[in-house]
Image (tube, rainbow, N blue to C red):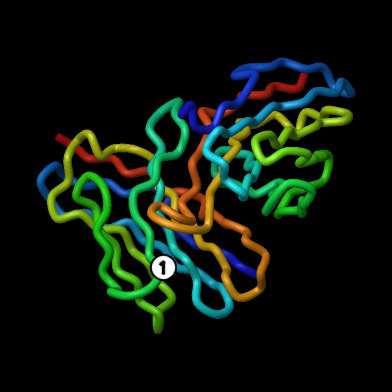
Amino acid sequence: AQSVAQPEDQVNVAEGNPLTVKCTYSVSGNPYLFWYVQYPNRGLQFLLKYITGDNLVKGSYGFEAEFNKSQTSFHLKKPSALVSDSALYFCAVRDNNSGTYKYIFGTGTRLKVLA
Amino acid sequence: NAGVTQTPKFQVLKTGQSMTLQCAQDMNHEYMSWYRQDPGMGLRLIHYSVGAGITDQGEVPNGYNVSRSTTEDFPLRLLSAAPSQTSVYFCASSYSGGTGANVLTFGAGSRLTVL
């Protein structure tokens, strides 16, 4: 069965420092991978996706993520964190080999950027 | 486009009552889904649909029913509400072809409390 793991409940980083939010997945075949962000009392907003091609994908607000097939990881990164990046981040996967079209989400990682 | 519209935004029910959470999208997306968000549990898939007349179960389908009679609408029914169904519910949709494909667009959420 598909699954997504976000091993850190919370990540704290100082403003201006690089940030990494970790995600690993378990799915058969070639997955579609996504990152979403949720600000307080809001719905989820799309940040970036990996479908195929270059393993490094760039998304909104200066975020990027690297697809690593051998480690089954898709970590979210940003070179220089902003206080406004503080939010809840979700990694998601869609299995494309079983025809189920299920999008499965991780448990979320709360990012806190300290001024 | 209004995007994904969920109603109501807030609802309080008593145990055993029934209700329907409405979800409508005006983007002609073939894929629609319902998630519930609980603290520490992330987003869990309840039901999803790949097109009108087609629905399937997600990770936590018990206690919920869905139908998809039109492309636009995907209501979620609670037949006999239980306190364990207290949660925030999100509807999301996507399409499979062209720019922006496979990205879930989320509604603003519906907060349900079951007493």
Task: Give percent across and percent down for residue A33.
Answer: 44, 63
- Check the image and report above or below for A33 versus B8: below
Q: Chain of mark 1?
A: A
Residue at (63% x, 42% y) in the render = B35
Q: Which residue is mark 1?
A: A51
- Res B75 quadrant in image: top right
Residue at (75% x, 34% y) in the render = B76
- Res B113 quadrant in image: top right
- Res B19 quadrant in image: top right
- Check the image and report above or below for A95 versus A81: below
Foreground pick, A88 / A63 = A63
Task: Give percent across and percent down for residue A99.
Answer: 66, 69
For mark 1, give the secondary structure.
loop
Q: Residues within 10 Å of mark 1 (few under 14, many from 20)?
A: some
Q: Disc 1 marks which amino acid?
A: Ile
Task: Give percent across and percent down for residue A79.
Answer: 14, 55
Task: Give percent across and percent down for residue A63.
Answer: 24, 52
Foreground pick, B53 / A75 = B53
- Check the image and report above or below for B102 versus A99: above
Instruction: Please identify the residue farthest to the left as the structure is shown.
Output: A16
Q: Quadrant of the C terminus of chain B?
A: top right
* Left-right relation of A96 to B68: left
Residue at (76% x, 53% y) in the render = B57
What number of labels is visible? 1
Residue at (40% x, 84% y) in the render = A70
